[in-house]
Image (cartoon, grey):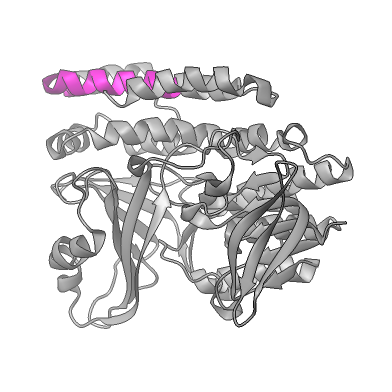
Amino acid sequence: MFDYDVIVAGAGTGGATTAYTLAKRGHTVLLIDRKERDSIGKKTCGDALGSHHIHELRELVGIPELPKDIVEYQVNGIDLIAPDRNHRMRMAGPTTTGMSLNRLKMGQWFVGLAESAGAEVMSCTRVNKLLFKGGKVSGLKATREGESEKEFTSHIVVDATGASGLLRRQMPESSPVEREIANEDRMVAWRDIYETPDFDFETPDILEIFWNQQETRGGYTWVFPQGRNRVNVGNGVMTIDGHRNPKDIQYDFVKKTWIDTWGEIKVLDSSGGIAPIRRPIDTMVDDNFMLVGDAACQVNPVHGGGIGSSMLGGAHAGITASEALERNDTSIGSLWPYNPRYHKSYGSKQAALDIFRWFLLNVTNEDIDFAFKKQIIKASDLLDTSMTGEVKFGAGEKFKRLVAGFGKVPLLLRVSKVAKLMSDIRALYAQYPDSPKGLSAWKERLALIYDAAKVI
């Protein structure tokens, strides 16, 4: 006998969506989180979400409308700004229309959804170790504040512990699940939320992202207004060799360039965090075990946003787990459909954007300024790329831009190469194996594309 059908470790948006989906389908679910119940949802984040993710989630699992008090401000576009700060491109379209959120209230709402659907929520509880029976996951050990360690058993354990991947890293070496991810596939960030009574943001519905390879290599600075006199401002960088501490960047470069220009400010929150920025974990399942959210690397590799993609991952995980439980078969083969389902909805695009991330890492400020000035890549191109994971130009427009960019032939050749590799990886994800047996050969083909991407 098992204590629960499913134990979900981590009550972030991915974990809470998984718990909600399963509980709504009548399964017994334990949702565990180390934070106090009233603090679940508090996280270092840009606090922005595209509306299309909510629509997709509603179609998948029928979540209700977001309460109005969760939404701080409506977002209608994103400005991408060159290092020289003289050139910018505005992206406006389905994936850039959304909302600036109260992250804590949103987290509380999602956990409440899971709870109201029938999930048991256990807060102030630290997950310690996976339990195994016959070499397969059978539950976990956890310690609730002020109590002794206890064992909880279940048919399926879902690791939604965030970027640490606490349970993922405890899987045996024989597991096909990647236990560790490389430092280069992580981003560290720092962000502050301010009230700015002396400064009015002229376009509070437009988010701003600034590229500067000298200050934030492999990352960017963001300025996300939350109304005319409130802002979420921060920066993130890849954890490659020699990277700077984002807190130092915040109170040096970001402070001098933006914060000091806003007059008197009131600090509402300051915090740092870490997120994976790569393709999804190559298989997000094993026998009786699943990965969701940051633990599964379900994050946009270019901008590090993971709210929407984690919710999608949670929905697909919950649907797949429910079907497996109804078959009374929670083996890796029975849970396997979660992989291609997620890849079809987001993972394939995510992998293509991971290729684009390596291209962006290796361009210079001069290259970026030139591309913006000459409109070699337009906002519509980047919007299409963000929506589809493809880089493509129209034939007539391509010729005009090639002429404009003649002085940067190496850059144009690299753009062409990265477009080809992004197309290749999308084609490879379309051929994701339909069973665990094909994973090894598929990963060999994947490695070849990544090797090429890292030297563009």
**Residue 309, percent from left and from top:** 55, 48
* Residue 138 locus on image (x, y percent): 74, 51
| Percent of width and height locating residue 181 | 43, 41
| Residue at x 31%, y 33% (from the top left corner) | 358
393 versus 259 height, above or below:
above
Residue 223 shows in the view: no
Q: Quadrant of the N terminus?
A: bottom right
**Point 65% across, 31% down: residue:** 340
Quadrant location of the C terminus?
A: top left
199 sits left or right of 289 in the view: left
Of all residues, the one furthest to the front in this rendering is 134
Q: Position of residue 208 (x, y in %)?
A: 31, 56
Q: Which residue occupies 81% across, 41% down? A: 324
Q: Nearer the viewer, residue 91 or 54?
A: 54
Q: Is residue 411 magenta?
A: yes
Task: Judge whether residue 404 can be spotted in this image.
Answer: yes
Residue 160 figure quarter: bottom right
Residue at coordinates 13% horizontally, 47% vertically from top-left? 84
Res. 334 image quadrant:
top right
Q: Is residue 47 above or below residue 367?
A: below
Q: Nearer the viewer, residue 329 or 209?
A: 329
Judging depth in this view, the residue of 31 and 150 nearest the camera is 150
Residue 262 falls in image quadrant:
bottom left
Main SS, magenta residues: helix
User: Is residue 4 toward the left or the right of residue 18 in the image?
Assistant: right
Q: Nearer the viewer, residue 191 or 333?
A: 333
Which residues, given as a range, are shown in magenta? 404-423
Marker count (numbered): 0
Instruction: Residue 146: say if magenta.
Output: no
